[in-house]
Amino acid sequence: MPAASIARVLIDSPLPQLDRLFDYRIPADQLSDVRPGCRVRVPLRSARRIADGFVVDVVSSVEHDGVLSELEAVVSTAPVLSAEVYSLARAVADRAAGSASDIVRLAVPRRQVRVEKSWLADDAARSSRSTFAAAAVPDYSTAALDEAIVNSARVALEAVPHVVEADGRWIGHWASTMAALASRALQSGTVILVVPDFRDQRQLETALHAILPADRIIRLDASQSNPDRYRAHLSCLDGEPKVIVGNRSAVYAPAENLSLIAMWNDGDPLLCEPLAPYAHSRDAALIRQEQQGCALVFLNHARTAEVERLVQLGWCVALGPVKRYLPKVIPTAQQAAEDELAARARIPSAAWREARSALESGPVLVQVARPGYAPRLECESCGLVARCARCSGPLGVRNAGSSPSCSWCGSISTRWQCAQCAGTRYRLRGQGASRTAEDLGRAFPGVPVVIADGDRPILDVGNRPALVIATRGAEPVAAGGYRAVILLDGERMLARESLRVGEDCLRWWSNAIALSAVGAPSVLVGVGGALAGALATWQLEDFARSELADRRRLRFPPAIRVAIVTGDSSSTQRALASVTDFDGVDVLGPVEEEPGRVRAIVRFDYARGSAVAAALRAEVIRNATTRRRKVPATGAPPPAPTLRVRFDDLEPFEQL
């Protein structure tokens, strides 16, 4: 064969047994078109069909002695799968016992023919970009951050909790910090900035456009149309340094010369991929930093236990602002302890006083736990929680006067009847954003009331007096900052069954407090103990340190890693048997989830991660290939593969 005439192809398939590179001979008339990263079609003899794939490498020889099949066709000559992205996809998939093609599907958008043809024809647009000047990083030691970028360090950076003005808009200080970091790292290579949702992304883009030319900034996120996202992906391939900003999948953006990855709010669950192999963007960023030797920054108000573990291991360096800013946080738990009536009140007198005083000069933020009117209903006779007759989900009322509806399936319950006492009358339990707005509107007549939640996304409010009722994470940014912040429903938030409920609450509350004006009060209602102390002193890292210590004692993540194995009894037992002999591995279960299906938890040290993942992945492949026997002419077909493995999932621990 002539030199470099064999293509190594990654098949685009969810089947675990196809998660490897296949070798194909390149026909002579296609030699000039085939190059690493291009899309091709290849034959699959076992399935007698044509499959799509990506060329990962072009080589001159392979170990196979037989005759190789030929490529069916070259779909596109554009090298859309870069070498660094494939290496990252392979490493992330191996860590999570998944398929590299699942990661590549997240990294490479669906092909858009017109966009691709225009990009291939327009070489001039990919020549050079405009110049820029690096910006100083306000409130931080610029020299220390420059040193971290040059030395490709991993940094846990504490965010400054207030708002700033950029390009005529008010944004969080964290966004200004990330933008300035990006401008400094951009001098030596491409920068990837990852944020959880569109609200954060808009703030960050505002900060970037204030200090960098527009042609240096590339937006890459799931909210874009297919042509726009593919166009942005192709723009990342031109080799020019740029800033790529987007949500969780942006961590897989192509960048051969990568200088910095920065991630905001890594504890947000939106950064965890909901599709197999369920990899968290934080883990992908850590792998990519090690592969490409770039700097990595985790920016938070409240540090996660995962980042705290890296700090304690010396894997991350903790840095903070030159001068610490201490927000004015007022916990009301002490007042409630002294006054029995205050203990029953949803909004204590201290919060009323602060809100009334602050409304004289500007807006006040009120954070609540749930949207809607009344998140829960209960039977008026016996007090049993009202549940849906269809799916047993809790019933609630979305608006005043509306019929009860299920918060799980959305079914309307017009003729509800209590399952315990057969009563037909219910009473409201709890207060959502709409009911809170109604109550506060009566308490403060003449003051505008704004509701911000998932159904009513509001990104900005002005500096005039107003009551802004927002659910957690949906708080708009106020011009000049809120004159007061009232954090309600703390006890309800903490009552959620979750291993990381303390971390989540601290993140929600600290992010809301950071939207206040300098010196403005933030009232934390009904919460005391370590969480209230951490917020009042703004020593948020102390809580992360204590949380990690508790999890070490209990052998809970992230002190150790876990793998959740589910399937029928026999396949699950075989999978568990493949890892039980490893040192540092223990198994909880299996327990029955439903008839014919069991679940087990495998706990193991980080040092055993590769071995455990490889062993469980081998069992997944073996389980998937046992169905390849011929389907009998009569009788039931063989059962479909049932074995599933998910790494680093905390859901089973939330039920302990």
Image (cartoon, helix red, strand yellow):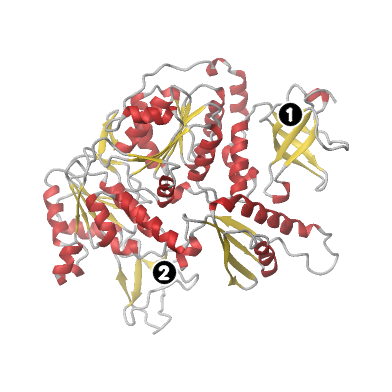
Residue 452: tell me if it is visible: no
Q: In this picture, is 49 found above or below 37?
A: below
Q: Residue furthest right?
A: 66
Residue sitting at the far bottom: 421
Q: Amino acid at mark 2?
A: Pro
Q: Position of residue 128 (x, y in %)?
A: 50, 16
Judged from this view, the residue extending furthest toward the front is 583
Secondary structure found at label 2: loop
Q: Residue at x 66, y 65 (%)?
A: 572
- Tell me the element at label 1: strand
Image coords of residue 426 (percent x, y): 33, 75
Q: Nearer the viewer, residue 477 or 276?
A: 276
User: Between disc 2 and disc 1, whose residue precedes?
Assistant: 1
Q: Quadrant of residue 383?
A: bottom left
Q: How many other residues sit within 10 Å of disc 1, few (<14), some (14-19) or many (≥20)? A: many
Which residue does the numbered mark 2 point to in the structure image?
394
Mark 2, mark 1: which one is toward the viewer? 1
